Image (cartoon, helix red, strand yellow):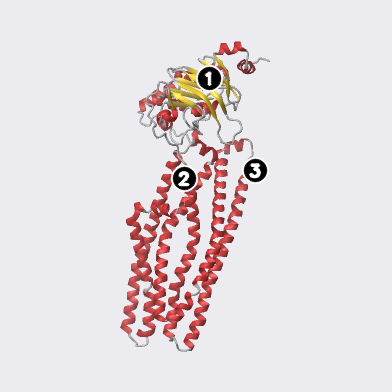
Amino acid sequence: MVKRFISYYKPHMPLFCADMGASILISLLGMVYPIMTNRMLNDYIPNKQYNAIIIAGVTVLALYVVRLYLRYFVQYQGHMIGTYMQAQMRTELFTHLERLPFSFFDDHETGAIMTRMTNDLFEVSELAHHGPENLLTSSIMIVLSFSYLCTINVWLTLIIFTCVPFLIIVSAHYRKKMRAAFTKRRESNAVINAALESSITGVRVTKAYTNADKELEKFEVGNEMYVDACAKSYSAMGKFFSSTSFVTDVFNVIILIAGGIFLYNGKINFGEYSTFIVSVNLFIQPIQTLVGFTEQWQNGATGFKRFLEIMDIEEEKDAPDAIDLGKARGDIELKDICFSYTENEENGVLDHVSLKIPEGTKIALVGPSGGGKTTICHLIPNFYKLGENDGSILIDGQDIRKLTMDSVRKNIGIVQQDVFLFSGTIKDNIRYGCLDATDEQIIEASKNANMHDFVMSLPDGYDTEIGERGIKLSGGQKQRISIARVFLKNPAILILDEATSALDNTTEVLIQKALDELCKGRTTLVVAHRLSTIRNADTIAVVTDGKITEKGTHDELMAKGGTYKELYELQFRTD
């Protein structure tokens, strides 16, 4: 883990070296005051060297001015190094998230992922700045101050040095408990963010059902977990700092007693004793800094560990010999598909499903909820991976496992019931189907989706801001934007997954006209509960309990008198 953390310094090595150099100079300049104090007490003042006293004072002041600018550089540029590293990690994490399979997002809440992206990486950036600086400068100061104290009195210095092992033992004892406690605190913080993200996203539902108290109750579960985790972490931290501070306080007691005995026995003079008391802080302070650095190390190390946990999850990868599909014709075949979302699932979602969808035809999937219809829609674009023994899906006769995922997905357009729109303008969201599309192409796609007249009635037209997830638009308007997006993409294969089930009858008619236009010349797979919308499909397949139990045209299935007829008559019953 340390090696991977250090690798993030490489792009910023010149600035990092300058920062470390400035930190070392600050430490060296910190030695000037006790040295000058020693000269004052033992030479200049006893010998009444007035000019030397003034020159010494001015020299120290001048060096402190230099240290002023060095500290500014370290604080500014040092933190910028941490920020640059944080930005690099954030970019890598975001890029990695975009390449993770659907299954990852099935198991991880958005708020928890955001916590790793923001809070955790901020702590990592703080460690990136202060970690090397504290370790380097404190180590140098300990060596220099120890050497300087030895020049004053070796035996008194050695007595102080014997206390250091006790400090190390105490630090090591409590550091392990701190690490576990801080990890728990980060996990609980992720729970809070996940609950917050969920509650804010669903605030309109909460208000509609007047369930604010219930949301507060759910939020408080995470909040209390966080308080409990904080209590444990702060308790461990309190024990750590109180114990280590006690050891450093003992340092001063030992100096007071041992120094007094040495002075009493004439082994040290008053000037040397005074200088030693002033200078011993040069030795104790960096030790305290290293002790205090432990908390920052725990925060940063925990954050970096959580960052690596996601970064080490395997990305979606094409097969080593994967080829580009190119422009697809649209011929699809599912051959003996067996699929489960989890390995421990007793009954698979799909059980030996075989289906042919010839180029340019329209097939509809119907059946009870949970039967596996949407799963089929997810498998064709290769959103979930089929194992070697789980059957195969062919597009234009080629197994999608041997095709690059991007080339497969570029040929597929998807319109779902739950439309997702990005914050931005109507134009931005339509252009998502083809990022280099011209305004004329966007308008043409909008007209095909029966959207243009509505857009032009808005004050800002295509530049109208739609709000978070399109909150300022109706369900039908959002659906038409998603249809326009697919028109712009112009794919050979179209998947309509409950595209009109959430709309009112009037809006459904408008949307259905746009969808009928969209389906022309494309291989189309439709999932629908409203059977009236798929009567004209070339083939209708009934999917029940992961199996295709019936297949044929509307008239053929009605004549069979099976599940499809039951569903149809149930939906259109008059009694």
**Residue 57 x %, y %:** 35, 77
Give above or below for 147 relative to 325: below
Circle 2 residue: 312
Question: Which image quarter: residue 562?
Answer: top right
What residue sits 41% from the left and 57% below the top?
A: 129
Going from N to C along the chain, the mark reached first, 3 or 2, is 3
Q: Which residue is drawn at the image coordinates 53% and 75% (left, top)?
A: 250
**Which residue is drawn at the image coordinates 48% and 68% (left, top)?**
288
Please state the horizontal and vertical placement of residue 167, each as a whole percent of the image: 51, 69
- Judge whether residue 354 can be spotted in this image: yes
Sequence order check, earlier mark of 1 and 3: 3
Please identify the residue farthest to the right as the structure is shown.
575
Secondary structure at badge 2 equals loop
Q: Which residue is mark 1?
A: 364
| Nearer-the-camera pick, 480 or 173 | 173
Q: Are marks 1 and 2 in contact (CB under 8 Å)?
A: no
Q: What whole-number distance in Å separates the C-alpha atoms at marks 1 and 2?
A: 40 Å
Circles 3 and 2: CB atoms closer than 8 Å: no
Q: Quadrant of the C terminus?
A: top right
Q: Amino acid at mark 1?
A: Ala
Which numbered disc flags the more N-terminal residue, 1 or 2?
Answer: 2
Q: Mark 1 or mark 3, which is nearer to you?
A: 1
Tags 1 and 3 touching, CB below 8 Å? no
What residue would you read off at disc 3? 213
* Label 1 crowd (10 A; few <14 / some 14-19 / many >=20): many
